[in-house]
Amino acid sequence: METKYWVVDKTVENSGSYPQLAEAAQLLKEKQTVAFPTETVYGLGADATSDEAVDKIFKAKGRPSDNPLIVHIAEEKQLEELAEEIPETAKVLMKAFWPGPLTLVVKVKKGALSKKVTAGLDTVGIRMPRHPVALALIRLAGLPIAAPSANRSGKPSPTLARHVREDLAGKIAGIVDGGETGVGVESTVLDVTAKVPVILRPGGVTKEQLEERIGKVRLDPGLKGTGARPKAPGMKYTHYAPNAPVYLVDGSTAFMQQMIDAHRKKGEVTGAIVTEETSGEIRADVVAVCGRRSSLETVARHLYDTLRSFDAQKVDVIFSEIFPREGIGRAIMNRLEKAAGHRYVKEKDVQ
């Protein structure tokens, strides 16, 4: 399959200046798959009402079919067409965070969407992205767009169009290049069908921000390899992983260096994920600076690009710093733990 490629200047507010999006929107109407930028990561979009179109997402990504998809809309009235009911909690959060990196899980209206989107569940995750290109494309298509991240299943999500090309060129109909995404990690997924709303996936809107608006919010413990169906993407399967195994280092930089040295002595090519504050203290074959510890938003923005960079360097093992589980740090650690398969090396266990 030939993959069409369009470059769009995301700083242009007038969607009439995006003639190339009309072609991309037409492909979506024809039940094809098109990758496009959002403020979080690049998504792989298709008509959420069509089994045929949604099947093409799963095929291109190699994604398990029991992993539900998030639906993207451009107008609030679309939510009324898709949701059986809209809880008051959802309305408060929509006013505060839409458009933006917050996905709300609601009861789905019968027959409104392909059952392949919901993985047979009676709920669906819906969001309105905060990106002018994404919103213009969805409006032009005139459809609710199912869109998981535009990468091969299990690999780090794409924050640049070239990441999408590396993974999916020849497997999808088109790629809209709108430059680098902003937040860098996926949206927060919040189940508002529960009495106390539940975060199913931490992301660009933090637990603290949600609780400022609606009070108590619970964190879902996640699915630990059970047979249950996940209610949101990223709950059940390994995600975000580079080719080499990743180990999360719970300890000092001196301890991380000790781990790196031990593997280098075995002839392995070592990689390290560090911050600007610690980069001068670590010596590995490939040292990747993911951002500043003093500004975790910079770490979130560059995390996936950092994880992807090790594949090109052909490292054998990767060691990473860990981060505080508060604010956006909760989302960063969620992604790192999945990339590492929850592998930790702890200084206190080695001493």
Image (cartoon, rainbow, N blue to C red):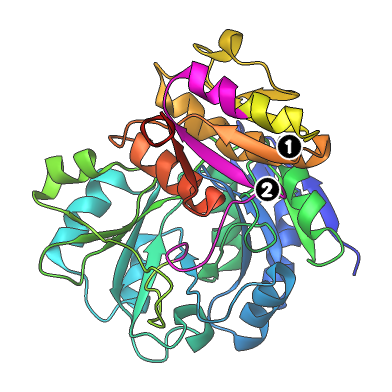
Q: Left or right: where does residue 21 sit relative to residue 96?
A: right
Residues marked 1 and 2 touching at CB (< 8 Å): yes
The numbered mark at residue 310 is 1
In the image, residue 255 lies in the stretch drawn in magenta: yes
- Identify whether 294 is placed above or below 141: above
- Residue 78 seen in this snapshot: no
Determine the CA span between mark 1 and mark 2: 7 Å
For numbered disc 2, what is the local secondary structure?
loop
Quarter of the image with the N terminus is bottom right
Amino acid type indicated by mark 2: Pro
Residue at the disc numbered 2: 242
Neighbor class of circle 1 (other Cα within 10 Å; few <14, some 14-19, many 20+) is many
Residue at the right extreme? 2
The numbered mark at residue 6 is none
Amino acid type indicated by mark 1: Phe
Question: Percent from the top left, x then y, of residue 311?
Answer: 77, 42
Question: Percent from the top left, x then y, of residue 61?
Answer: 69, 68
Region rendered in magenta: 233-259
- Identify whether 327 is placed above or below 257: below
- Identify whether 205 is placed above or below 224: above
* Residue at image point 57% right, 10% down: 281
Q: Left or right: where does residue 322 sit relative to residue 107?
A: right
- Identify whether 239 is placed above or below 192: above
In the image, 77 versus 90, the foreground residue is 90
In the image, residue 286 lies in the stretch drawn in magenta: no
Question: Percent from the top left, x then y, of residue 43?
Answer: 60, 56
Label total for image: 2
Q: Which image quarter: residue 97?
A: top left
Between discs 1 and 2, the one toward the N terminus: 2
